[in-house]
Image (cartoon, grey):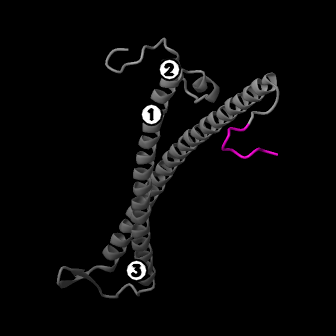
């Protein structure tokens, strides 16, 4: 290993380059390489978590924008409905800055229809963006769940192995005691076990 790089032929490199996180393959690594792998996987998990959070914020912003456009669309539909009910000789005024300007009814209807089309296009674009970001969030979430499951499986397997080792130590101690002729004799200041 040079400058922290891992040779591509080592078991660690093979584990890290493998697409799926395999607990048995991980546990077959030497202890030091397990720590290196866990550190790398924890960093990857943190990166997924950061991008997931960023995508969540992006999704909230997109939904908020879509809601604003939807409110404008509703408002303009109301204006269109009111204009459609006006007689053809009605006077229509448009507020431009602080000034009311008279506008031809047909021109006003065309302007409202143009805005409605623009809002429809904006809503369609927003829906596509929301779907795209939602899909990205779901993919990140799936990957994060895989990491969490892997970490849990590794922890459970390590605990199981520790318990096995402890049981073996207890069995060996019991076997040694049995060979020596029974339970251990108490030391002078210890009460006898019954």
User: Residue at the spot x=37%, y=74% of the render?
Assistant: 109
Mark 2: secondary structure: helix
Q: Mark 1 packing: few (<14 Cα in 10 Å), some, or many (20+)?
A: few
Q: Is most of the magenta stretch helix, strand or loop?
A: loop
Is 108 left, or right, of 158 in this rendering? left
Whether tag 1 and tag 3 are in contact, CB under 8 A, the answer is no
Whether tag 1 and tag 2 are in contact, CB under 8 A, the answer is no
Horizontal and vertical percent position of residue 78: 44, 80
Q: CA distance from mark 1 to mark 2?
A: 12 Å
User: What segment carries the magenta color?
Assistant: 186-194
User: Residue at the spot x=43%, y=84% of the render?
Assistant: 82
Mark 1: secondary structure: helix
List the residue tagged with mark 3: 79
List the residue tagged with mark 1: 39
List the residue tagged with mark 2: 12
User: Residue at the spot x=49%, y=14% of the render?
Assistant: 10
């Amino acid at each position: 290993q040079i400058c922290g790089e891992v040779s591509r032929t080592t078991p660690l490199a093979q584990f890290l380059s493998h697409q799926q996180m395999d607990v048995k393959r991980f546990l077959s690594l030497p202890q030091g390489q397990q720590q290196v792998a866990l550190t790398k996987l924890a960093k990857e998990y943190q990166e997924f978590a950061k991008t997931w959070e960023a995508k969540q914020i992006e999704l909230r912003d997109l939904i908020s924008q879509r809601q604003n456009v939807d409110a404008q669309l509703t408002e303009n539909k109301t204006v269109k409905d009111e204009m459609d009910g006006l007689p053809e000789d009605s006077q229509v005024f448009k507020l431009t800055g602080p000034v009311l300007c008279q506008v031809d009814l047909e021109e006003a209807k065309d302007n409202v229809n143009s805005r409605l089309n623009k809002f429809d296009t904006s809503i369609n674009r927003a829906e596509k963006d929301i779907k795209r970001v939602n899909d990205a969030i779901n993919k990140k979430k799936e990957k994060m769940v895989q990491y969490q499951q892997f970490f849990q499986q590794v922890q459970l397997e390590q605990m199981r192995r520790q318990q096995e080792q402890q049981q073996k130590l207890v069995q060996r101690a019991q076997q040694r005691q049995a060979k020596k002729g029974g339970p251990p004799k108490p030391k002078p200041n210890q009460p006898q076990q019954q």
